[in-house]
């Protein structure tokens, strides 16, 4: 099948959200092996090629660090948008060349609404300090999409003015608005240290770790701090990254459910080719079908565990892995 027809077939399957995950992942693997030269070289080196793969866990997972040193694309195209990881001027930033922003938007909205419901019910307040200044952030792009999809004139971004955010939430609460507060973890912690707020009827969604800005905390510890200061029994989470186009969401307890287009698989820490068992901690490998035009099979630098009910816990970075990510952006004005 010609590349254009094969890609359209796979894209149509993804956006229908009616497919067998394993079967479609196999089709994506074959497509990317044939059309992504760097990934094909990696697969050839390992001797794991189409026709010799009998399960998802035997598909090669490309180390995420390749997104810093190479242009990871399947096919030839002019990118509609290029996402870049955050970092300092001395760091080489990961880049994700997105051929089809429409595919990304469709998948991102679907994955969120499957967990939390229609975006139109929310007024979205986003606490993402300094993201807009650096630009090229997939998180800002996604949240901006959600803000527009909400259709609420009061939905907007905040940077450093916590007092303004607190006053705005009180004003909107008095009007009966249902709030969705999305914030990067260290900024939410800064907010919690300065303010005690009653958000018990609203959704608070944290989007990542401290990454050098504050003392590292386990997600459960952070959620305990935020819960006490925000009068919330459960703090939600979003797990995503520059190199992915799908996201995972948690309503609370740090447990993420699988999304239709994304599946995490823990592998043994000292053997990246052996699947880890249920309820055991391993290196998090991710299949992201929405990464059709890049690479859908990525070995991250995170640790995770998956239980027998297909609920995942993201436990943080592996020891000695590079500290990277959007939380380096935060500076006080």
Image (cartoon, helix red, strand yellow):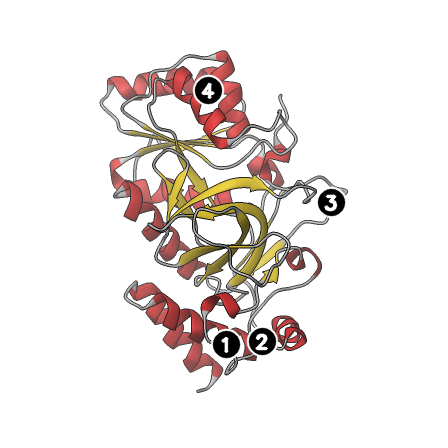
Front residue of 211/160: it is 211
The mark closer to the camera, 2 or 4, is 2
Question: For numbered disc 2, what is the local secondary structure?
Answer: loop
**Which residue in the protein does label 2 denote?**
48
Quarter occupied by residue 320: top right
Q: Quadrant of the C terminus?
A: top right
Furthest toward the left, the residue is 176
State if disc 2 and disc 1 touch (CB < 8 Å): yes
SS label for mark 1: loop
- Taking depth in this image into account, of 62 and 75 the one nearest to the observer is 62
Residue occupying the point 28% across, 20% down: 173
State which tag comes first along the sequence, 1 or 2: 2
Q: Which mark is in front, 1 or 3?
A: 1
Q: Which residue is mark 4?
A: 225
**Which residue is pictured at 61% across the width and 65% down the height?**
72
Q: For numbered disc 4, what is the local secondary structure?
A: helix
Q: x, y percentage for residue 198?
A: 33, 16
Q: Residue at x 48, y 37 (%)?
A: 207
User: Looking at the image, is 213 positioned above or below residue 255?
Assistant: above
Q: Earlier in the sequence, mark 3 or mark 4?
A: 3
Locate residue 220, reporting x and y percent. Answer: 46, 29
Q: CA distance from mark 3 to mark 2?
A: 32 Å
Q: Residues within 10 Å of mark 1 (few under 14, many from 20)?
A: some
Q: Which residue is mark 3?
A: 91
* First along the sequence among labels 2 and 4: 2
Query: Which mark sits nearer the N-terminus, 3 or 2?
Result: 2
Quick one: label 1 or label 4, which is nearer the N terminus?
1
């Amino acid at each position: 099948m010609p590349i254009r027809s094969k890609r359209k077939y796979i894209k149509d399957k993804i956006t229908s959200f009616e497919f067998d995950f394993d079967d479609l992942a196999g089709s994506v693997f074959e497509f990317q092996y044939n059309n992504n030269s760097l990934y094909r070289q990696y697969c050839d080196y390992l001797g794991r090629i189409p026709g010799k793969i009998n399960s998802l866990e035997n598909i090669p997972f490309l180390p995420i660090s390749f997104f810093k040193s190479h242009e990871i694309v399947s096919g030839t195209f002019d990118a509609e948008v290029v996402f870049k990881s955050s970092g300092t001027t001395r760091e080489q930033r990961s880049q994700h060349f997105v051929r089809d922003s429409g595919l990304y938007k469709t998948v991102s909205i679907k994955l969120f609404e499957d967990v939390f419901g229609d975006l139109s019910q929310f007024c979205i307040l986003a606490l993402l300090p300094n993201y807009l200044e650096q630009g090229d952030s997939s998180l800002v792009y996604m949240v901006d999409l959600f803000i527009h999809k909400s259709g609420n004139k009061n939905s907007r971004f905040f940077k450093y003015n916590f007092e303004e955010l607190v006053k705005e939430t009180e004003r909107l609460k008095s009007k009966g608005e249902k709030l969705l507060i999305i914030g990067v973890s260290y900024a939410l912690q800064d907010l919690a240290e300065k303010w005690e707020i009653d958000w018990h009827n609203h959704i608070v969604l944290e989007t990542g770790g401290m990454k050098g800005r504050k003392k590292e905390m386990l997600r459960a510890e952070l959620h305990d701090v935020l819960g006490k200061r925000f009068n919330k029994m459960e703090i939600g989470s979003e797990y995503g990254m520059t190199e992915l186009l799908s996201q995972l969401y948690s309503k609370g307890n740090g447990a993420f459910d699988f999304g239709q287009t994304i599946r995490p698989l823990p592998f043994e820490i000292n053997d990246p080719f052996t699947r880890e068992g249920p309820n055991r901690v391993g290196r998090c490998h991710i299949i992201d079908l929405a990464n059709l035009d890049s690479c859908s099979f990525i070995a991250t630098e995170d640790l995770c565990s998956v239980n027998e009910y297909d609920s995942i816990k993201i436990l943080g970075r592996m020891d000695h892995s590079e500290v990277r990510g959007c939380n380096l952006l935060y500076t006080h004005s």
